[in-house]
Amino acid sequence: MLVLTLHCGMKHGPNPNVIEIPGYRILRQLGRGGMATVYLAVQESVDREVAIKVMSPALLVDPNFGERFQREAKIAARLHHRHVVGIHDVGRIGDYHYIAMEYLSGGPVLSKDGPARPVPFALRVTREIASAINYAQQKGFIHRDIKPDNILLRDDGSSALTDFGIARANDSATRMTRTGAVVGTPHYMSPEQARGKQLDGRADLYSLGVVLYEMLVGRVPYHAEDSLAVGIMHITQPVPMLPDHLSVLQPLVDGMLAKEPGDRFQTGNEAALAISRYEQAIANGELAGLDIAPEPAQREQNQVETRVSPAPRTPQSPRPAGRAQDSRLRADPSLGRMEEILAATDDHILRASRVSRRKVASGGRRIWPWLVSALVLLAVGGGAVLAWKNQDWLRSFLPATELNDMLARAQKALDAGTLDGNAGESARELFQAARTLDPDNDIARRGLKAVGERLLERARDALERKDLSLARRSAAAARELLGGGVEVDALEKAVAQLDARGTQTESLLTSAQEALGKDNLLGDEGAVALYQKVLAAEPDNALAKAGVQRSAEALSLQANAAIKGGDLVNGSARIEDIARILPTFPGLPELKAKLASQRDQAAAALAKELDRADAQLRAGRISGDKDSAQALFEAVLALDADNQRARSGLRKVAQALIVRARAAIEDSNSELAGRLLGQADVLAPGQADLNAARVELRELRERLQIAAERKVSSPADIERVRVLIGEADQAMTAGRLISPPGNCAYDKYRAALSIDGENPAAQDGLRRLPLRARELFDQAITEANLQRASGMLEVVRQTSPADATIPGLVERLANAYVDLGEKRIAEKRPDDARRALQSARALSPNNARLGGLEQKIGTTPPASG
């Protein structure tokens, strides 16, 4: 089995810090973060600039980072919106995960510490990103990290949201924050995100409101020395007031930065609609008091305001209700309600202290009640400012027992993704050690369960990347911690199936290689079908892709050989095979051009042969040798089976053969006539002239036979002939022309001729049969006896197949059926009308009246009662 090794590493040479990714030409670095580096590159297959985000290989030791990175690709690739950055490609080369995405040359919407942006710009960008958030809400996704760095600008000034790396579906069972860790950027977090609560799209709208405030004012609304303090300010502090020159926009900011999700705009569309109303009012000059482009000095003097703003005149934008105006009067930081503080911080150490208080030193037992009482008094008794300023001092009173320290280290290892190992620093080892110290510790028990669930996640990720070894190890470790379960069983089954599929893939590849070596390319057991089976299970299998490419090249050789040899049918078939299995095959256009050229040459040669065949037909050289008209037309059809000119030529040859056959019949040469009619039947079977000539030939043969067997008539024979002719005349008068058998005019006349083959009365009677049939046909049409008319038409066809009046009789009968159908429509009998329509169509499919009758039938209800 051939193994392909893909090498990806640092380039050696002029720029050793640029990585190599097959299919891309790296131009320069655009930016670097803690998780990834972004490069500007050219995607060589389509010659377009892209931004490639490459995850740092140092982070691969932490599966949580890899998971977040892959999640970004999978989620973002499913989002297609004008204001969401598009994803072109996702892959991994060696130790590098990468995503190739749309390159937006305008950069972030705000630079760090940059000035405020003009009001129209800020409103437009906010509206565009609100529409992207609405789209994500409808798809069930939350971004969770909306900030200026994740809002990029295109050359035309439009904006797009990027980096769905920590987004997740609302119904996803995999939680990035399973242990309560908060993911996001503190300055842009919603209050519920700071508390670690469940989120929805309204949290993204809050973060977008922070970005809007920053674009308008030039700074974020809340700022403090550490992230915890910023998070608590988002929870407890009022929505800041805009400067006076922007006060008309205050309801919009209020609607986005309301503390409770129910008080905000509920969807991105609601926010976008409100912004659109402001933009329209600005365009119409209705907001004269709005300073659209504030001076830099005004922006520098702007501070977080705590006064109540005057009620400005604003467009009719929705302003969420529920937040009292006086809440805006709170200016100093506060700890907020006790449950909010606990929700916003990691309280597992506090819980651990309560669970294991029997192990805490006596000094700790004396401090804890005092500390809790102090916190309650401070929060309830008006000492919030003092508690805020001394929060680090208060934290110093938390107990630091060995068990609590171990649990804290275990939780940190779990958050960092260090799940398993043997160095004593993994979450599994630390939680198990904690249980050794305190077998009943609920935190340790839940921690081990969380480790097991994270190991399951790691196993699923490894399975998706087809890393069977890691998937097996992680699943086995998860089974030990979780004690089995449906999810573990299903995962182990999936690993086994993937392992089996890998074995099957190797077998298919081997069989495909053997088939390719034998030039067995097509069919169920051909190389192409076998390679395609591999690709159906593994779309990125490089060996199978290469095999399909080689198969297409082999088919190309076959097509070239067929075209060169003049076998255009097989050449065309091979070209169609190539287009079906590999539409992007490079040589396909050239093959099609060769085929078209050969077809043009072949068409010219065929036209020349057809001209020769027509000339031979006019000269009377109809058949009999290789240069006859028949032979030449047949030679053209052997090369082009659908050539209409050649087919028409053979029909003309058949007609000429029929003419010669009739001449032979006139000469009583039944043998030559039969041979000529046989040739005509092969060339153009079913022609009316051919059927008529066959009747004439049959009559000739009968006459010749009768003449050969003729004997002298006796008086009894003469009397018998006289009686038969009388009975035949009576049958003709009665209208029994060809039925019933034995008692009809036709049979009686024929019986008389069998006795006296030259009897003129019998011969005249047979000649008068079609005339009498036409008379009875006219009578039946007049009487609307269409069944009788059909019978008489059949008599004419059988007794005189070449009768020139037959087409006219057919059209008259068809029109009579149409008349009958219209009569039944008038009587509201649509079923009877439909039967009449069917009879008319059987006689004359192209009758111009059929369509009108059919339309009337479709709109006619049946008669009631």
Image: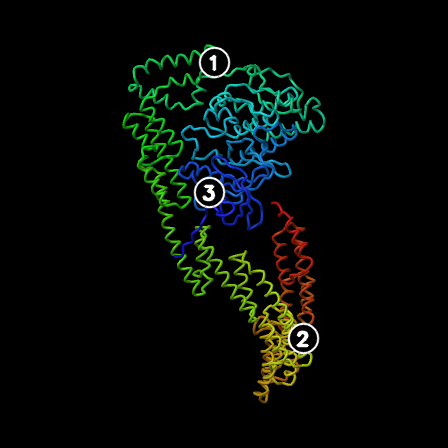
Image quarter of residue 567: bottom right
Helix, strand or loop at label 1? It is helix
Q: Quadrant of the N terminus?
A: bottom left
Label 2: how many Cα within 10 Å (few below 14, some 14–19, many 20+)? some
Q: CA distance from mark 3 to mark 2?
A: 69 Å
Mark nearer the viewer, 3 or 2: 3
Helix, strand or loop at label 2? It is helix
- Residue that numbered label 1 is attached to: 384
- Residue that numbered label 3 is attached to: 97
Name the outermost residue toward the bottom: 712
Marks 1 and 2 in Cβ contact (< 8 Å):
no
Q: Amino acid at mark 1?
A: Ala
Label 1: how many Cα within 10 Å (few below 14, some 14–19, many 20+)? many
Q: Amino acid at mark 2?
A: Asp
Left or right, residue 227 beside residue 769: left
Percent from the top left, x then y, of residue 113? 57, 28
Percent from the top left, x then y, of residue 257? 56, 24
Image quarter of residue 178: top left
Q: CA distance from mark 3 to mark 1?
A: 48 Å
- Looking at the image, is mark 1 or mark 2 earlier in the sequence? 1
Percent from the top left, x then y, of residue 191? 50, 24
